[in-house]
Structure formats: structure tokens, C-alpha cells
Amino acid sequence: MDAAMATPAKRPVSPLLSSRFKTLPVSSRKPPPPPPPKELAATTLQQTKQLHAHIIRTQYQTAAAAPLLSPQAQINHLITSYIKNSSPFSALKLYAHTRKTGARLDNFTVPSVLKACAQLSSIRHGMEVHGFVVKAGLDWDVFVSNSLMQMYSDCDALGCAVKLFDEMPERDVVSWSTMIRNYSWCKLFGKAMDLVRDMLLSGIRPSDVTIINMLNLFADAGDIKKGRPVHTYLIKNSVKESPSVNATTALIDMYVKCGSLSVARRVFDRMNEKSTASWAAMVAGCVRFKDLSAAMELFAKMRDNNVFPNEITMLSLVIECGSTGMLQLGKWLHSYILRYGFKISVVLGTALVDMYCKCRDLRSARALFDCMDEKDIMVWSAMIAGYSHTNCINQAFDLFSQMKSLNLKPNEITMVNLLSLCSEAGALDRGRWIHSCIDKQGIEMNVVLATSLVDMFAKCGDVNAAYAVFNQTTDKDVCMWNAMINGLAMNGYGNETISLFLEMKKHDVKPNDVTFIGVLRACSHSGLVEEGKQFFNRMEHAYGLIPKVEHYGCMVDLLGRAGNLDEAHELICRMPTEPNTIIWGALLAACKVHKNPKLGEVAAKELLKLEPLNSGYNILLSNIYAIDRRWNDVAQVRKNMKDTGIKKVPGISSIEVNGVVHEFVMDDASHPLHDQIQAMVAEMLEKLKRAGHVVDTSGVFLNIDDEEKETVLNYHSEKLAMAFGLISTPPNTPLRIVKNLRVCDDCHAASKLLSQIYGRVIVVRDRNRFHRFSDGSCSCKDYW
């Protein structure tokens, strides 16, 4: 296939329905054939099949039907019935049979057959039909060409649709409208807007559907400047004919999504006639702007005007509540649905479950989920996604096991959510199990799923497995390259990250801002200061990418880790935008590592101006004062934290054993194996002492004696997780631990020795990077 027909990135698939229902263009086709007689009016799939068999037996010579319907009309009606009954395979079989018999197929038959191809997402069958269209000389028909364009778009072959559109000898308003919508769906807003301009310049007067598609385009692009002329066009043409309710509703939606709620409200208030969708769009706008009182007021007015919401209205409002986190309104809508006797369909129930999950009310989500009589794969995926977003890994996998016991086949979305959970928890065994489930269930390994696997393996520290999936994927997009680059960076493979970046260029994949975050992080973790500076400078000059605050944060981290604190501070002062918490946080962390209390105090005070209630920044400021032995200032910071109710975030370490993730906090006594864990910790400390380990108390910033500091360090969460791993796994089994904070100096030194003492590979993922301890050394080379 040539370059013009190359398929772009697929449209993202949402686990739920979109909050806006796009209007499909209505073609200006010729008048339909007369309706079939009663015996041909098949309405169910069974009736359609019976009629099909009868026509084949009689070779289209049904006595009652013959005077009224031609063979072509009979075929058209049958194919249409198959499509309506969601039986596209049968429609294609009838099409193939008809061609074999030599019966004539016309420009009414082909669009229906193309709908069958679209339902199956079968571009192969669609191209075969396209070939027939050309041979039969039907490509002159604009209705057939429009149907071909729609089929290619539905099969994610936008390049083919574009080529067809460019070669059309004649285009009608439906052709333009279809192509504008196709570009919009693929997020190619620039091309869609160019097409709008070309359509107007060619003298095509936009139809109502075209207006709606244009407004949807500007809404998705957030381009209010382009949307206002459409509003002006509607006002000017209102002298001849009033704009339709659907077009005005799309206008309201456009203003809402472009951030202009007040203008949307003015348009709404001036409408002479309002549909249910108009009210829903305005209420959804208030929800989007978190104006609870206005949303409730409009909902009440809606009922006062005898306009009652239907399922689609409630669905869109519930989805909007989930997107904006408006739990109170979401609960009220749920009670309204129950109070007024709405039947909670699978789709509406899924939306409610998803809304509760996104608002982090998992108890209500699970209660509704358990009460649903009918559940499809989407509602199971929504509930699993809720557990995924709140890192409830055990609950998510329990639910997945229930789903499998009911013989429900998981889809791509389910697997992506479970892999995301494994990534965050560092649950490699469970991640491997999900990988095997994907193969066993025959789920298509598309680029989205493959990228999730690469991300999971990399974040669990298995870089070889990540590379294996990466190399097996042929249609790599920039997201997959970024996942592999960031995975290598996190694991401390600086030079390998740079090599992969150069290979990415050879494959003509254009890097984006996320790519450079990975490359700069790799340079930071590996001490590649000069290389990092070069990549940062080349971002804008060689790739046209203006560095964002995240890239400046990487550079401050790079310079700070290397001890170039003054240079890092100078870079902050030269930033074109105001530095945020990412920037000052990187500098403060570097000041703590390199014991520069003066500059650290500057960074800490800037951080507390931005986020005065952040416990981490208060603790770091306290630690900076402790380095300088300013105990009165330490006491003052801690007093302020106590007075304002700021609590220190505890260090939490987790380890996966036999598919179960166990969590530990410092001096944790809650685990069922507490006594055995304590005994193993005592054994570890004794063996460390014999090996010559001296406890490094420099990381304990408390005004207490060294003996008390040693006690604090001995029961850090990662040591408890390590002890549990040693008593719960066979010898020589690698231990994989995830910690939410940076590993302290003493635990880092102890882990190196323990890997040698017990002959274990110990992999620890802390807040910054991976540490792979083996035979007395660490992969970070003590640079973290």
C-alpha cells in the first residue's frame, strides 16, 4: 500500500460510551425502492434466514413478490435485514452468492454490503467490494463513494478514505461532512479545519449535519476562535430559516468545551425550542464547571417545562459527573434514576459504576455492581479499572478470577487496567500471569496492549522481558518507543537508553516531549551530565520541541545529582516560566544529598509557598535544618506540622510472594508472621554486623543519640519486606521490593551486603529508580 493509503494511529477506545453522541451524516440518496410485501417484511434474524432460503430455492421467482419486487430489491432488503439484525457475515455470504449467480447488484446494494464490512472491521472484505465497484462502473455514484469512505474510516484506514476522497470526480455535502468527521475522530484537527475551509471556498453550502460536525470538531480541538464564525453563520442565516435544535445544541456543547459557559448559557436561554439533548448539554456544562447549584436548578427547570430526561440524557450526565469528580451530583442522579423508575440497563449501570470509581467511592461502586442482574464485559472492566486507579491490586485480581469463573472473555481494556496495577505494585508474577492469559484467551496483541506489557515488565525490573515484547511488536508507535526508553531510564541503563533513542530516529519515528523526559532521566540517573545538556539543547533546535517544566525539572535533577547545585539554581533563575514544585523539589532533594543547607532552605521555602500543607516538603526542610544542627528550627517545623494537622507520609514497602502483595511500614507488627519476621530481622542484623557493616545514622534527622537512631534504621519498611521475602521464598529466589520513598543510605549499604550474605538478587524500586543488588554491589553504582 502506498504512502497515501497508510493507516494512522487508531482512535483511542474508551471503556465507556463517550459523553457526546456524534451525529452521523445522512446521505442524499435516491428514493428507496417500494416496501416489500408482507411475506418479505422480515424483521427478525430467523425470518430473514427463512426468506433467504426460500428465495434461493425459487431462484428469486416468488410468485407473490415477483410483480412487486425485482431480484435486486429482494437482495437489498435481505442484506439490510441482516445488517439490522447484527448478522454481517450472513450479509456478506448473500452478497458473494449473488455475485456467483450473476444477478445484477446496484448502487443500493453496495452501501449495505459496505456496512457489513464496517461492522466486522474487515478492510480485506471492504477492499474486495471496492474492487467490484470499480469493475461494475459504480464508482461514479457519489452515494457509493461516500459509503466507501465511511467503511474505510470505520476500519481505521483513514489513508484509504483520504485517497478516495481526493480522487472523487464529484463530491456532495455528505462527502465533505464525512471526511471532516473522520479527521476529527482521528484527532487530526488541523487537517479537518483545512477541509472546512476548502469546502466553503468551493461554494458548498454546509448542511445541518455538516454544521454539527464542524462544531464537534472545534469543541474537540478547544478552538473557540474557529467556532465563533459558525455561530455568526447560523445567526445570519436565521433570517431565512431558524437553526435546527440539534445545531444549536452542538453550539452550546462547543462553547462549554471551549471554556465559555456564560456564552453557552446565553445561547441556551435564547432558544425558542429546546430538546432533551439541549437541556442535557447545558446541565452537563454546569457539571463540567463544577457548578452544582446551577446544574440542580436547570434540572428542576427542565422538569417544570415538561421535558423529562431519557436514558441517554442520564447517561451523559453521569459520565460528566465521573469526569469532573462530582460525587454529590452523581449520587443525586442515581437516586433520581431509582425514584422515577428508570430501568438501569447494562450501559447506564456501567456508567454509574464508572462514575463511583472515578470519584473514589469504591464501596458504592461495588454495591451497585453486585446488585446488577445483567453484567457484560464492560461493567466488569469498569469495576476492575476502579480498583486499578486506587491501587487495590488484590481486590482487582479477585474480581478478575470471578469473571473468569463465569467464562467471560476479558477484553483489551481489562488487561490494560490489570497490567497498570501490576506496574504500580511491582507485581511481576501477576504481570507474567496476565501475559499468559492474553495468549491463552486469544486476545489480539495490538500496540496498546503491547505497550502496557513493556511498561509493566520495565517497571517490575524485568528489562529483558520488556525488550522481548518490544522487539516482537512490528507496528511500534511513539508511545511504545517511549515506554521502552523510560523503562531503560528507570532501571539505570543510561547508555542503552541513548542507543535506543538513536535507533528510534533510524525508524523515522519522531520523538515527542515524553521521549526527552525519558532520555534526560537516563542521563540523570547515570551521571551523563554533558550528554544530558546536549539533548536538552537539541530539543528545540533539532526537533522543534520547546522544553516544558518537566524537562527543566530533569535538568535540575541531573545537575543536582552531580553536585552542580549552583548551576542548577542558575538554570532555575533563567527559566522562561515560573518554577513549580517539580523544579524546587529536585533542587531541595539534591541539597539534602550533598548537604547544602543554605541553598536547600531557599528551595524549601519556595516549595512551602506553593504547597504549604505538603508533608514531604516540610520534612525535607526539617532535615535540611538537622544537617546544619539547627534543632530549634527543626522543632519549629515539626510544631507547625502538628498545629496544622500535617502528617508525615510513612515509608511503605511491598513484596509479592505467591501472587499476593504484602505491605509493610516501619516497625510494623500487623503481619500474621510478625514473630518470624522479627526473628529474621535479628538474624540479618547479626550477620551484617559480622560482615563489618557499620550503621549509617547520618540519614536520621532526629535529635536523639546514635543508639536510638540505629533502632529506627533497623526496622525500616524495606528491611521488614526483605525479611519476609527471605522466610517465604526458596533459596536463590530473587526478591522484588517496591518502596514509595527514596531508599536511605543505610538500607542501601545493608542491601548490598545482604545480597552477598544470602546469595540472593534483591531488586528494589524506590521513588526514583531501580536498585539491583547482587553479590555485594548495586546497579546504580552508588549514584542515586
Image (tube, rainbow, N blue to C red):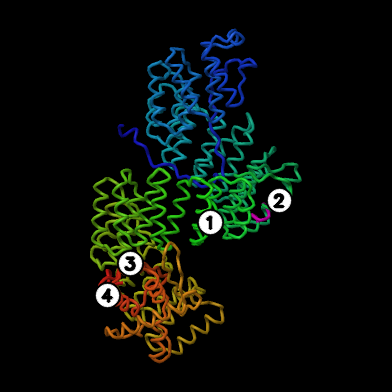
Q: Which residue is mark 4?
A: 756
Question: Mark 3 and mark 1: span between their CA atoms?
Answer: 33 Å
Q: Residues within 10 Å of mark 1 (few under 14, many from 20)?
A: many
Whether tag 2 and tag 1 are in contact, CB under 8 A, the answer is no
Image quadrant where one finds the N terminus: top left
The residue mark sitting in front, 2 or 1, is 1
Question: Mark 2 and mark 4: span between their CA atoms?
Answer: 64 Å
Q: Residues within 10 Å of mark 2 (few under 14, many from 20)?
A: few
Mark linked to residue 386: 1
Question: Mark 2 and mark 3: span between their CA atoms?
Answer: 55 Å
The residue mark sitting in front, 2 or 3, is 3
**Sequence-first disc among 2 and 4:** 2
Secondary element type, mark 2: helix
Pick the residue in front: 482 or 540: 482
Q: Which residue is mark 3?
A: 733
Mark linked to residue 711: none
Question: Mark 1 and mark 4: span between their CA atoms?
Answer: 41 Å
Q: Which residues are magenta?
A: 329-333
